[in-house]
Amino acid sequence: MKIGILGGGQLARMLTLAGYPLGLDFVVLEPAADACAAPLAGHVQTAYDDPAGLAELAGQVDLVTYEFESVPAGAVEQLGRSLPVYPPANALATARDRNNEKTLFNELGIETAPFAEVHDLAGLEQAVGQVGLPAILKTRTLGYDGKGQQVIRPGDDLAAAWNAVGQVPCVLEGFVDFDREVSIIAVRSVSGELAFYPLAENVHQEGILRLSTCLRDDSHQPLAEDYARRVLERLNYVGVLAIEFFQVGEHLLANEMAPRVHNSGHWTIEGAQTSQFENHLRAILDLPLGSTAPQGHAAMVNLIGELPEEKTVLAVENAHLHLYGKAPRAGRKIGHVTLREATPEKLAAGLNRLNKILQ
Ligand code: AMP
């Protein structure tokens, strides 16, 4: 069985690593020559919207999945004519647009921060009246890791904010004074089997995920699973879906969803019985899903911008180093480290050691 992946970055790389033991082969479609999944897979090196490249991929594989949501709709449509493509096109169309995803959340009774669509400067002024300040102006599409976002505080110049995001369609979102940020990784297979991982607590720095810690037996788990189930079933979803929430007291406000394996689920490689990567593959191949039960107490730290010395990281007991084979560059995710420990105390001590190394 050969699986095509649109995108050849670290998520594609970790999908291939999870797929080899299952006897799977992979081809990635990715424009960059130095795609970090390419050494592990066939590589169709072309633009995502190149019909000839997409036809070449379709000719080589049995089904297609993707590692990012900004895949052109036309590409999914073309591939979908000859092959199964998972997650489904409607999930992609919803998740790539912040307005669509927040509208879906509210339709399904899932709370969000107050938000309003913005198409021009006059619309921004109106949206500020509706949502209030402080607020965050976010581009509807193509935003990730805090990119395409502008915080607006009382007294700020709205025209400057509108220029800063490039005068493209946006949503204005009320600023949430959250207790914690958490995310759920959920899975649904072709036959409709469902599985949910324990919530992860996420800490961001400058809009980029830095630390994810598996929360065992958190009181918000049932609500997060209920919300995820509503989305999975409405979209007739297949594969792994991540939903990020702001937790405010007993409430979970959905911030965004990702129709793919997610950075806040990397801890599952060592910290869960079955990783999110393996379960994504099982789901799209309609195989029984693996147990999502946590193993020990786990947390993941992203390596962003520069690489620490390998031997220093590996000297930390129970540290598992994952390097993506990407050139270091400011703000770029180039690897991660997962710690799995027997107790929360040991995990906290290990994270302390790791943080000193990574500072
Ligand atoms: P996003 O690209 O929407 O995931 O935003 C990146 C990060 O910015 C989030 O993980 C939060 O830490 C912060 N952030 C985004 N939206 C809000 C909001 N409405 N209120 C408070 N913080 C936010």
Image (cartoon, rainbow, N blue to C red):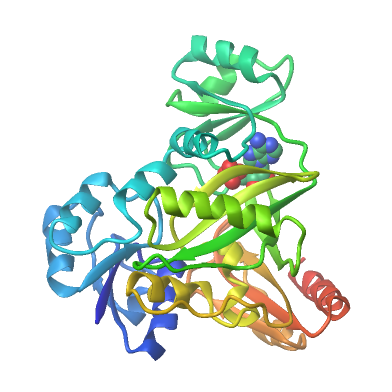
Looking at the rendered structure, the number of numbered marks drawn on it comes to 0
From this view, report whether residue 325 is shown above or below residue 51: below
Q: Position of residue 146 (x, y in %)?
A: 58, 44
Q: Name the residue rendered at 63%, 78% in the picture.
A: 293
| Ligand 1 shown in quarter | top right
Residue 204 visible? The answer is yes
Q: Name the residue rendered at 83%, 81% in the picture.
A: 343
Q: Position of residue 212 (x, y in %)?
A: 68, 64
Query: Where on the picture, by quarter, is residue 357?
Result: bottom right
From this view, report whether residue 346 is shown above or below residue 92: below
**Quadrant of the frame with the C terminus:** bottom right
Q: Is residue 10 left or right of residue 343?
A: left
Q: Position of residue 32 (x, y in %)?
A: 32, 62
- Along the viewing direction, whichever of 212 and 152 lies nearer the viewer: 212
Q: Is residue 84 left or right of residue 357?
A: left
Q: Name the residue rendered at 51%, 72% in the picture.
A: 276
From this view, report whether residue 158 is shown above or below residue 247: above
- Along the viewing direction, whichever of 111 and 58 lies nearer the viewer: 111
Q: Is residue 104 left or right of residue 81?
A: right
Q: Name the residue rendered at 41%, 56% in the picture.
A: 68
Q: Position of residue 325 (x, y in %)?
A: 48, 75
**Quadrant of the frame with the N terminus:** bottom left
Query: Where on the picture, by quarter, is residue 161?
Result: top right
Residue 6 visible? The answer is no
